[in-house]
Amino acid sequence: MMTETCKVLMIFPLFNANSFWNYKEACDLAGARYPAAPLGLVTVAALLPRDWEVRLVNRNTEDLVDADYDWADMVMTGGMLPQRNDALHIIETCRARGKPVVVGGPDVTSSPSLYSAANFQVLGEAEEIMLDFIAVWRKGAREGVFEAPMGKTDVTKSPLPRFDLLKLDQYLHVGIQFSRGCPFSCEFCDIIELYGRVPRTKTNAQVMAELDALYALGYRGHVDFVDDNLIGNKKALKKFLSDLKRWQNEKNFPFEFSTEASINLADDADLLRSLADTNFFAIFVGIESPDTDSLVLMQKKQNTRRSLQQSIETIHKAGIFVNAGFIVGFDSEKGSVAQGMIDCIEDTSIPVCMVGLLYALPTTQLTRRLLAEGRLFSGSEQTQSGDQCTAGLNFETKRPRRDVLNDYRTVLAAIYDPVAYFGRVRRLGRMLGRKRTHRMIKGDLRSFVRLMFRIHRAGPGTAGQFWRMMLDCALHNPRALPYVVMTSALYLHLGPFSRQVIAEIDREIADVEQGRWHVPPVVRHVKAELVPA
């Protein structure tokens, strides 16, 4: 039986509550409900037939009710690792209600066996296989697996995302994408496994159309380029930035941009200048470790070829502030790494640092190595209680587990102490070479007033450090004020969150010391199958 029209309910699963990234208090300051909008689902929505009806429910921002399920002919869901628990719950609910459910996204692509209860699995990049799925659905099939070759999708065929499905005022920022893939081969990272090592870029016209669409919907403010490494294809990026600067000038700079990039950005003065000229204000950089041996082992050699402190200072002086990622638990750690990591964070004046415990993600080189060495724990892949901050070390560590955990809690306690945090914000405020004045948008003043009245909630001594930092910035670099306010707002989440994680790690340390923690069974490899040892 041919099925022509269809009502599609897209459900974006809940992220686990214990997450570094949810920034609940910062969202509340701005009147938002969650930091980022679900770009993947609104892109998939654009691949569906025009005569199909589509509804989007983001479980992180709104309620999912029975009437939503009753309306739908089909449910589409899926996402990342920290959304796994809720995605599986949604699939279970759909099956109980007799609603066909389609699951896609990076986690099902990496661990399809965990999602076997779904009617359909869409593995890999959707652009290549959605037409096949739609054809099968229209013919009446209600089961199937569709798999795209990894890293081969022509992103110039990616459609304009259905931004109209988003309630834009619910988010701190909206994402767009210029490229997919990363040229590096970090052992612990799954980006190259999912999207390849050859960055593929959209056309300039595609991205401009996406910005035009957001502008036409009335959106103004923060737009995040969700690229795996924005500078992975520098030649294409430089051509794009010239068009982007022209567009920003014509529209009177309605957007400020952030992204993720590798540290070698600091080596290219022209590219850094172009990013600043087009109003990029923040980048996330994976520093991971200040230890050269660890960087070599994880195949992140690009971080060993330059001074991290000088590189970060160069980026800050260009007017772009850096957020960074660090990881504790590498095999190459010969002794305590806590003080070296603390010194690196302080020396580089990076306020916001995502410090996590090493986690062996499915499909990565790290996981394959740990599997071959008989060190990967069995069962850790079934459920997820948080992110790298609370769910790491799913393998037998080279160093004593207690020492790794103690280093981790030592780093968190030091860098998220209010004196240390706002000291870094103050030094950042002096360095940040912003050329453009921040464009005030609706809600900025209200958010700042709320911050003034709530900053004390982040812990004892926080308010005094905040006002000292604000006065210093006002006197020495007033153009940086909007950005030090941003990083201060994040402390409303990061201060209490760090203390919550420290308390959890202290409990884990106590379990190890008192013999309550036992090494879980490991996984062994037999004829390409994962088998508990």
Image (cartoon, rainbow, N blue to C red):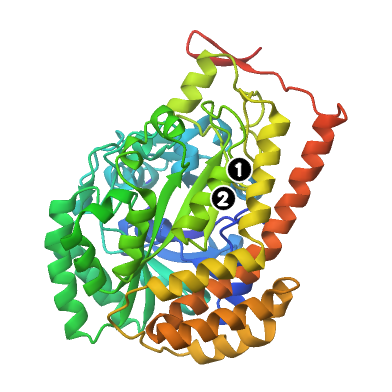
Residue 196 is tagged as: none
Q: Which quadrant does the N terminus fall into?
A: top left
Point out residue 160 in the picture as x, y percentages from the top left corner. 27, 64
- Asked whether disc 1 touches disc 2, contact meaning CB atoms under 8 Å apart, the reply is yes
Residue in the image at 15% along x and 66% along y: 205
Residues packed near mark 2 inside 10 Å, few (<14), some (14 to 19) or many (20 plus):
some
Secondary structure type for disc 2: helix
Residue 342 is tagged as: 2
Residue in the image at 51% along x and 46% along y: 326
Q: Quadrant of residue 306?
A: top left
Point out residue 482 in the picture as x, y percentages from the top left corner. 45, 82
Instruction: Specify whether 494 is left or right of 107.
Output: right
How many dots with numbers?
2
Q: Is residue 13 above or below residue 256?
A: above
Residue in the image at 61% along x and 32% along y: 381
Point out residue 134 in the picture as x, y percentages from the top left corner. 34, 47
In the image, 92 versus 81, the foreground residue is 81
Residue in the image at 72% along x and 22% along y: 520
Residue furthest out toward the top: 527
Q: Is residue 24 above or below residue 473?
A: above
Badge 2 amino acid: Ile
Badge 1 amino acid: Ala
Q: CA distance from mark 1 to mark 2?
A: 6 Å
Instruction: Specify whether 434 is left or right of 169.
Output: left
Q: Is residue 505 above or below residue 532?
A: below
Point out residue 389 in the picture as x, y percentages from the top left corner. 62, 47
In the image, 105 versus 172, the foreground residue is 172
Residues packed near mark 1 inside 10 Å, few (<14), some (14 to 19) or many (20 plus):
some
Residue 66 visible, this angle: no
| Residue, disc 1 | 338
Residue 358 visible, this angle: yes
In the image, 60 versus 291, the foreground residue is 291
